[in-house]
Amino acid sequence: QAGLTQPPSVSKGLRQTATLTCTGNSNNVANQGAAWLQQHQGHPPKLLSYRNNNRPSGISERFSASRSGNTASLTITGLLPEDEADYYCSAWDSSLSTWVFGGGTKLTVL
Amino acid sequence: QEQLQESGPGLVKPSETLSLTCTVSGSSISNGYYWGWIRQPPGKGLEWIATIYYSGNTYPNPSLNSRLSISIDTSKNQFSLTLSSVTAADSALYYCARAPNWAGEDAFDIWGQGTMVTVSS
């Protein structure tokens, strides 16, 4: 089934800023908003952001999300070694009546 | 702090039925949240399976609906998933998770640790 599109990998240096993107369509990201999840190897996903730019309690302000049209973005500032993980976006698709996920972006902190 | 824990057999034979249970601790399963199942094949991305509310309302993934059954037992603070006629493509890490709503702008905000299910003879 159709999902959201994310670049497979992004590499950035320590203390730099990384911006991850997630492209959907008018049935999901554009009108339903997007969420971002972080997953470290061997661990379950962890919610970083929902409703485009709301952070759950305990999530660092270094993580910020936004949306422009069909594309959602997650910006991580001041990259730390522990930010190295897989990042997934998700959204409700009102046409498919399903939650859809992106394929994930592997962030490498150099 | 609410916690979710999946349980079930790690190995299922092809064509048989996969059954998993998620136990919610730290709060009542009838607290107004929705409860879902999501799976992740090894090395791959996430796929939503279904969501259920304490009232029994279910929201299945249409692509899995013909093989899927989801139920909730409020007395045990548990909800369960059964998936019939499994194949190797159903081998995955199965997560249970909580969501404020069954659709819309919210997301799954608390996840269990996951349980690996392998379909093999």
Image (cartoon, rainbow, N blue to C red):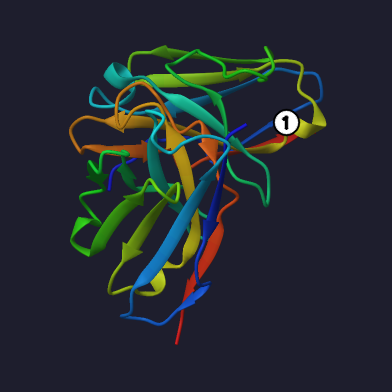
> What is the quadrant of residue A37 in the picture?
top right
* In the image, residue A92 above or below residue B112: above
Name the residue at 38% across, 35% down: B30
Looking at the rendered image, the quarter that the C terminus of chain A falls into is top right
* Residue A105 in the figure: left or right of residue A6: right
Answer yes or no: is residue A3 visible.
yes
Task: Report x, y in % for residue A31.
Answer: 27, 17
Q: Report the amino acid beneath label 1.
A: Asp
How many numbered marks have been drawn onto this rendered protein structure? 1
Residue drawn at x 47%, y 36% is B28
Percent of width and height locating residue A109: 76, 33
Task: Locate residue A93 relative to residue B31 in the image: left or right.
Answer: left
Residue A6 is left or right of residue B25, and the answer is left
Q: Image point 21% across, 37% down: which residue? A: A97
* Label 1 SS: helix
Say whether residue B43 is visible: no
Of the pair A16 and B110, the residue shown nearer to us:
B110
Classed neighbour count for the residue bearing mark 1: other residues with Cα under 10 Å, few (<14), some (14–19), many (≥20): some
Q: Horizontally, is B24 left or right of A9 in the view?
A: left
Is residue B120 depicted above or below A77 in this figure?
below
**Residue corresponding to mark 1:** A83
Q: Residue furthest front?
A: B75
Where is residue B61 shown, x and y percent of the image?
26, 48
- Rendered position, A18 above or below A46: above
Residue at left offset 76%, top offset 16%: A78
Q: Residue furthest bottom?
A: B121
Residue nearer the viewer, A81 or B79: B79
Q: Chain of mark 1?
A: A
Residue B109 drawn above or below residue B88: above
